Amino acid sequence: MIKNICKLSMLPLALAAGSSQAATISFSNFQHAGSDAVDYIVTIADDSEAGVTTGNFKISYQVDLASTYTTAKLTGLFFDVADPFIANNSPYNAGNLGLTNHTPASCGQGFNTDQVAAGGGCNTNINLGAGAGSFQNHQFDVAIAWKNNNDLSTGAVGMFEIAGLGLSLDDWAAVGVRGQATDGPGGSAKEFQIGADTVVPVPAAVWLFGTGLLGLVGVARRKQRV
């Protein structure tokens, strides 16, 4: 009996430890600005225990399996790591981005822009119109482009790493995604999200529950000694 109570009493502590050590954030509630609404999931991790190179961020991206539309050609991923409403305040540039482990391989980057035009078919843009509200014509801190080799239509997960530059996951402010061939051979997607998904903390009630169980453990042990 005491062993069972002990196990239950440790549950809230385990839950709390898991939440405090969370080393991943996600963007999965994108606003749709293209012809097709594609539901993407973008995650950013900085935990070396999860295989991320020390000092780096690892960015993973995919199409939600429940999405009505898919993406046979993801051409661009865009992001802000500072206040998205202040121009040219990002620490990233061509010399320190440190793009590595990009699977599949990207073909070009841009900075403080909404497009990449590297030539040779390496082109993408996320020109956001009036429907994007305050993000109309937004220029992202970093833009990364792919040609025709980034097919997410079969459930594939793409990923890459960039230098952390002393930033934390709290600094990630916005993400944009540009996809082509989202509805068979045609269609396109322009998705953006300001602020990561909300992380739900462990409720105070759970802590109270755990405290109560610990009290029961103490009472049970005292009874056994009497």
Image (cartoon, grey):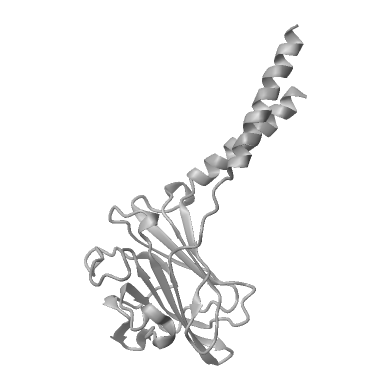
- Residue 146 visible? The answer is no
- Return the residue nearer the eye: 192 or 216: 216
Rendered-image quadrant of the C terminus: top right
Q: Give how far across and how far down residue 125 sits, in percent.
A: 37, 84
**Is residue 202 or residue 98 the one in the foreground?**
202
Farthest residue, direction top: 226
Position above or below: 93 against 19: below
- Residue at screen point 42% across, 75% down: 176
Specify whether 224 is left or right of 176: right
Residue that appears at 25% across and 72% down: 87
Residue 164 placement, left or right of 39: left
Instruction: Return the residue nearer the eye: 67 or 194.
Output: 194
Q: Residue at x 39, y 68 (%)?
A: 174
Q: How many marks?
A: 0
Q: Outermost residue toward the bottom?
A: 186
Q: Is residue 134 above or below residue 195?
A: below
Task: Name above or below for residue 204 compared with residue 141.
Answer: above
The structure residue drawn at horizontal position 64% and vertical position 37%, both measured from the top left corner, is 11
What is the quadrant of residue 75 in the picture? bottom left
The spot of residue 45 in percent (x, y) is: 44, 56
Residue 54 at x, y percent in the picture: 36, 50
Please say whether residue 194 is visible from this viewpoint.
yes
| Quadrant that contains the N terminus | top right
Drawn side of residue 151 relative to residue 87, left or right:
right
| In the rendered image, the vertical position of residue 181 relative to residue 11, given as above or below | below
Return the x and y of residue 214 as percentages of the image width and height: 65, 26
